[in-house]
Image (cartoon, helix red, strand yellow):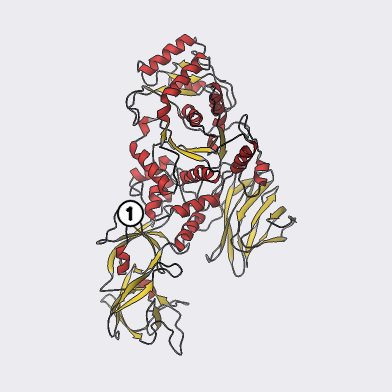
Amino acid sequence: MKPNDVVSELPKTPTNSPSPVDNAQQEQQAGLDFVRQVITEDLAAGRTQKVVTRFPPEPNGYLHIGHVKAICLNFGIAQEYDGLCNLRFDDTNPDAEEQEYVDGIANDVKWLGFEWNGEPRYASSYFDQLHTWAVQLIKQGDAYVDLQSPEEIRINRGNFVEPGKNSPYRDASIEENLARFEKMNNGELAEGEAVLRAKIDMTSPNVHMRDPILYRVLHSEHHQTGDKWKMYPMYDYAHPLSDAIEGITHSLCTLEFQDHRPFYDWVVEKVHSQSVPRQYESSRLNIDYTITSKRKLRKLVEGNYVHGWDDPRMPTVVGMRRRGFTPEGLREFCKRVGVSKTDGIVDVAMLEFCIRQSLENTAARGMAVLNPLKVTLTNLPADLDLSHARHPNVDMGDRIIPLTSEIFIDRKDFEEVPPKGFKRLVPEGEVRLRHAYVIKCDEVIKDANGEVIELKCSIDPETLGKNPEGRKVKGVVHWVSASKGIPAEVRVYDRLFTEAAPDADDDFLANLNPESLTVLQAVIEPALAQAQSEDRFQFEREGYFVADQYDHTADKPVFNRVLDLKDSFKPEKRYSKCTNNNQDKYMSSQFDFVTVHIKPNIHYKGRSISYLIECKDGSKKTLGVILPTEKPLTFETHVTERIEIVSGKCLVRIADQEEMEVYSSGESFTVPANSRFSLQSSEVVDYVCHLE
């Protein structure tokens, strides 16, 4: 049973929590998010002896970027506190589960760089104990078998404005309930004919406490237990009790399970478990230009809008891996996103930044011409084998680059009628071949249609490894030998959607990016053809690329573009609307030399809005989140550039400095590079960023 959209008033901390910490206290703990603060206090007070967490996926699909955050949080917490983290498959729905997903999830966790405690665990391994506890609940008068139809149960459950109605079977005797439950277990009742329900309170303001279903009849074979069972426990019943069986100390989940916490605590208490896990909820990971709904991702796959679950445009772990994203980059991204109790939208540029950072010093360099234009070097005396480092800053050895009389350059590096500021090759102009000579374009050859098909150029023989005398050559172009270069297929991937909120409307397919994949027939330098599957490279002046996990061979190289060298994605400019106290605000700012825009993305469940503050020239950027609420709010981020923020009425705290008060528009505070700061305000603050 999954969370629904019912909203109810619930306490903000777990019932009988060993260490209650309210939101204000959590946010004030410098350097620790609220989860780590709770754990630190539990350990210090002796309430917890050893931290035990778990990553509990349901094996009914492929993991995606949202699961990566959960993996990093649960395994990361265990590592930081010298604890343990279990990998447990909450496999309570055999109709939707497959061994393929079990194996895939385990591979994904390993690829991300984590090791779980012992062998993988399964909720199905605890089915006998869960059945024993269900019988115990019946005998205690805390559970009963309901023979109402599914539709009757749904109607009598009520909603968030109407209380539920008791089932006519609610007050059956313990003996009757035990007999009916035995029939469920023996397969004597048909699917949908009976369920086991907890007996709690049908008038509870929390719909999840209105006699939730514990077991349902299901005559399906299970991938772990075979045909032993004719009924299966519901997720909400099996999950907390599996935590208790495994001795989980801190059960970490996302905010949609907040309304489920009272039942989590109730069922653990009612079975008298010696181990009492506590549930803590934090925000899920939401990224713009990305969808993580399994239903919608399945629609993309089954509709052939993408080439399977591991299509490099998909946000699945297998897709990101095939795209060339690194485990290190994904872990760093999750670290930067952090943990909070407020849902928001993270800009995809932060993810891309972390991936680029992880590749900068790990990806060897090479040259590839994606759109070849033939160049004949008319005075090259003989073929040369040039030796050059595989990386400019990291010792990765050298590679041999053959220079021959016929080479290819990229078509975009030549203009017969150049635009203003063009610094590459033009008729009678000069450029340097990367790692080689300065060349001059002496002749342009065209076909019958007037298209340029070849350039005849001459080299300056005195410029190999040194600058020409008496003149300055500004342009540099990459190249590949025409005779010794290797043909390769290059798949240039871009973002799958054109809209920051692709599923804001019902028809998310209308927001698919028609240019999310371009397949090119390129030519690569010979050293690149020696790549193994999943080897990553920087194609000089082009971007980061990876040898395809499945299709790449030495005889037929196939490379996927991981990312451009810098963010070149330019979505349509628009002003997004955010609402606070029934007032709409539209934000945009422009300055003389650097243009900065503040882009509200999505007003997610009325809780938060995330902003990207970015220079349009792409040179500098900083990311942040503002939470527009009626209560005081805190904006916290790591600033990577020296910035000045002009704001409305607010209170500013900068690490290692005294706090400053900013009262009126036009007043400012300056945050030094690489400093942590927080911004508090009792209202939505318009702010703009000046970069020095």
Which is more toward the observer, 372 or 49?
A: 49
- Residue at image coords 36%, 46%: 309
Horizontal side of residue 162 vs 29, given as left or right: left
Q: Position of residue 571 (x, y in %)?
A: 48, 58
Query: Quick check: 247 above or below 618?
Result: above
Q: For the residue labelled by badge 1, is the local secondary structure a helix, a strand or a loop?
A: loop
Q: Quadrant of the C terminus?
A: bottom right
Q: Is residue 196 visible?
A: no
Q: Position of residue 363 (x, y in %)?
A: 41, 63
- Which residue position holds label 1? 549
Q: Position of residue 154 (x, y in %)?
A: 48, 23
- Residue at image coords 52%, 55%: 350
- Residue at image coords 46%, 57%: 355
Query: Quick check: 47 above or below 587?
Result: above
- Residue at image coords 48%, 62%: 567
The amino acid marked with disc number 1 is: Gln
Q: Is residue 403 visible?
A: yes
Query: Quick check: 613 above or below 202?
Result: below
Horizontal side of residue 43 vs 535, given as left or right: right
Horizontal side of residue 463 vs 209, given as left or right: left
Which is more toward the observer, 630 or 590?
A: 630
